[in-house]
């Protein structure tokens, strides 16, 4: 069995989670009659301090339902250059909502007011109206970094002062909360909508959720139907999310500790460049010296030696991701294998 460091999407549901799923009460969610989905939606809305929530198939779908709910066709959204919504969702803002995307360089995936000033189009028929700001917390491709609450407040106030809506891609919201010691509601108070995902570090087989006001979630529900994502007896999978919220949130600390352990081990190895202070959550990004080879070379050789990881975001850059399917012992083994390969 390989040590699986490609992504936290590779987590598998535990026996206890499967039992919770098997025992779930179900109904037709399309007409609001699945009691387990209803429970999940009201618990997550309460956890984030918002009026309503809608359960979805995936984080991509939750993000795109949000874009649909906030924007009119022809609008433009602002996002950091590396943002998932802009780069890894198959161009869906344009395909599904007719919304164009403007990428803005930030700091490790995080936008601040100084990056955003002057980026709103003026009211002129040459330009698409700028109506939405999308942030990511924690960031993915930019390195698993998190925002402080003051930072979020500043940027979202800027958005609202400029009549933009604010959406958070919180696919790894709980990682950010555990790393920073703030609550999901502390974060959510600054945003109009927040998506979060159950099938990454929380270990569910699928599912995500979008949270916001009743009016926005009503629009998002319609978007979910349009996108073919309306659900029927989805309580079976919603039960995994309820289980995950009860059992798999606090344990994210272990994943963050393992990520730090791995990063410190990698920092000792020749031909590896890594910024230790950038490792805040469960994502470890590092670069390989071109004198040794490329990231693709390391991805291939590591796989041959029992470690799966991704080369991503540049010829020399790789990502290793810790999660509930990777033990501290395996992190130690991975460091030894990397040492052997790279020295
Ligand atoms: C920040 C972020 N947002 C959204 C997603 C989309 O998740 P999914 O591919 O499960 O829809 C991901 C997936 O890795 C992500 O990292």
Image (cartoon, rainbow, N blue to C red):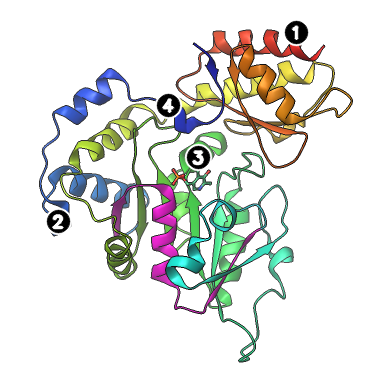
Mark 1 touching mark 2, by CB under 8 A? no
**Residue at mark 4:** 11
**Residue at mark 3:** 177
First of labels 1, 4 by sequence position: 4
**Residue at mark 1:** 340
* 259 shown above or below 341: below
* 147 shown above or below 191: above
**Residue at mark 2:** 32
* 68 shown above or below 73: above
Q: Which span of residues is magenta-colored?
A: 52-80
First of labels 3, 2 by sequence position: 2
- Image quarter of residue 325: top left
- Image quarter of residue 22: top left
Categorize mark 3 by other alpha carbons within 10 Å: few (<14), some (14-19), many (20+). Answer: many
Q: Is mark 2 within 8 Å of ligand 1?
A: no
The location of residue 102, given as percent across then percent down, is 64, 67
Is-magenta flag for residue 53?
yes
Is-magenta flag for residue 119?
no
Q: Nearer the viewer, mark 1 or mark 2?
A: 1
Q: CA distance from mark 4 to mark 2?
A: 29 Å
Mark 4 touching mark 2, by CB under 8 A? no
The location of residue 204, given as percent across then percent down, is 35, 33
Q: Secondary structure at mark 4?
A: loop
The location of residue 124, given as percent across then percent down, is 63, 91
- Image quarter of residue 241: top left
- Can you name the residue that lies furthest to the bottom here? 125
Q: CA distance from mark 1 to mark 4?
A: 27 Å
Residue pictured at 58% horizontal, 81% vertical: 128
Q: Nearer the viewer, mark 4 or mark 2?
A: 4
């Amino acid at each position: 069995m390989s040590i699986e460091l490609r992504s936290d999407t590779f987590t598998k549901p535990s026996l206890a989670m499967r039992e919770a799923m098997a025992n779930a009460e179900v109904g037709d969610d399309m007409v609001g009659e699945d009691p387990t989905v209803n429970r999940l939606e009201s618990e997550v809305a309460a956890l984030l301090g918002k009026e309503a929530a809608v359960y979805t198939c995936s984080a991509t779908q939750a993000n795109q339902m949000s874009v649909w709910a906030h924007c009119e066709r022809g609008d433009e959204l602002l996002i950091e250059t590396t943002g998932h919504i802009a780069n890894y969702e198959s161009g869906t803002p344009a395909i599904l909502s007719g919304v164009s995307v403007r990428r803005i360089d930030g700091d490790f995936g995080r936008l601040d007011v100084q990056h955003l000033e002057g980026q709103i189009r003026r009211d002129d028929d040459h330009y698409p109206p700028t109506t939405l700001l999308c942030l990511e917390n924690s960031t993915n491709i930019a390195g698993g970094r998190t925002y402080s609450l003051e930072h979020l407040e500043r940027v979202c106030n800027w958005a609202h002062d400029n009549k933009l809506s604010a959406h958070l891609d919180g696919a790894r919201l709980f990682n950010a909360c555990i790393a920073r010691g703030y609550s999901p509601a502390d974060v959510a108070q600054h945003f109009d909508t927040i998506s979060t995902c159950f099938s990454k570090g929380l270990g569910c087989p699928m599912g995500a959720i979008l949270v916001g006001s009743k009016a926005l979630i009503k629009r998002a529900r319609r978007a979910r139907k349009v996108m073919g994502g309306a659900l029927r007896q989805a309580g079976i999978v919603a039960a995994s999310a309820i289980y995950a919220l009860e059992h798999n949130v606090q344990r994210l600390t272990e994943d963050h500790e393992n990520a730090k352990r791995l990063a410190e081990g990698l920092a000792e190895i020749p031909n590896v460049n890594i910024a230790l202070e950038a490792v805040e959550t469960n994502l470890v990004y590092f670069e390989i010296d071109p004198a040794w080879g490329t990231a693709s070379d390391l991805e291939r050789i590591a796989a041959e030696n029992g470690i799966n990881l991704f080369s991503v975001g540049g010829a020399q850059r790789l990502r290793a991701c810790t999660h509930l399917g990777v033990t501290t012992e395996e992190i130690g083994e991975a460091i030894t294998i990397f040492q052997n390969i790279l020295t």
